[in-house]
Image: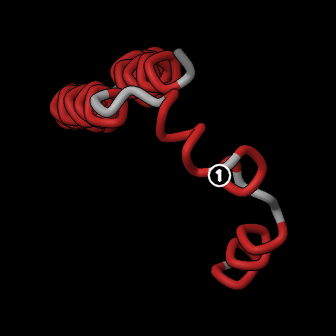
């Protein structure tokens, strides 16, 4: 897998090679990467806290009532959605 990613990285031309370093540096916001990292990081930390509590509760409920698996899976999925929203926001920040 690492070799495949390395080959893909070497074969595909980057934006810097296509446009030139000066034009890329002039058009990017220096704090955009920091803002994207903070939005993704905070969202993932919140998601981890939410999944920790809902996941433990879901395992307890499934142990007592196995027919409630679907409902508990939905609650854990809703908690994981927080990280996806943070990732979407970071993509929106970087593509601005």
Query: x, y (%) of residue 88?
Result: 50, 20
**Residue 73 shows in the view:** no
The kind of secondary structure element at disc 1 is helix
Query: x, y (%) of residue 56?
Result: 21, 37
What residue is shown at x 55% (from left), y 45% (from top)?
Answer: 22
In-front residue for pair 11/55: 11
Query: x, y (%) of residue 32?
Result: 35, 27
Query: x, y (%) of residue 89?
Result: 43, 17
**Residue 27 shows in the view:** yes
In-front residue for pair 27/95: 27
Q: Is residue 4 left or right of residue 33?
A: right
Q: Residues within 10 Å of mark 1 (few under 14, many from 20)?
A: few
Q: Which residue is mark 1?
A: 16
Quadrant of residue 80 within the rendered picture: top left
Quadrant of residue 31 within the rendered picture: top left
Q: Above or below — where is 12 with respect to 67?
A: below
Q: Is residue 6 left or right of residue 82?
A: right
What residue is shown at x 26% (from left), y 35% (from top)?
Answer: 34
In-front residue for pair 57/50: 50
List the single residue furthest toward the front.
22
Q: Is residue 72 left or right of residue 96?
A: left
């Amino acid at each position: 897998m690492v070799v495949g990613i390395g080959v893909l990285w070497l074969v595909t031309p980057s934006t810097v090679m296509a446009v030139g370093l000066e034009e890329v540096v002039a058009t990017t916001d220096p704090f955009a990467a920091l803002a994207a990292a903070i939005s993704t990081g905070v969202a993932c930390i919140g998601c981890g806290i939410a999944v920790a509590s809902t996941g433990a509760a879901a395992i307890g409920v499934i142990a007592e009532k196995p027919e409630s698996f679907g409902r508990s899976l939905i609650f854990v999925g809703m908690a994981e959605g927080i990280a996806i929203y943070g990732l979407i926001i970071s993509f929106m920040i970087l593509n601005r």
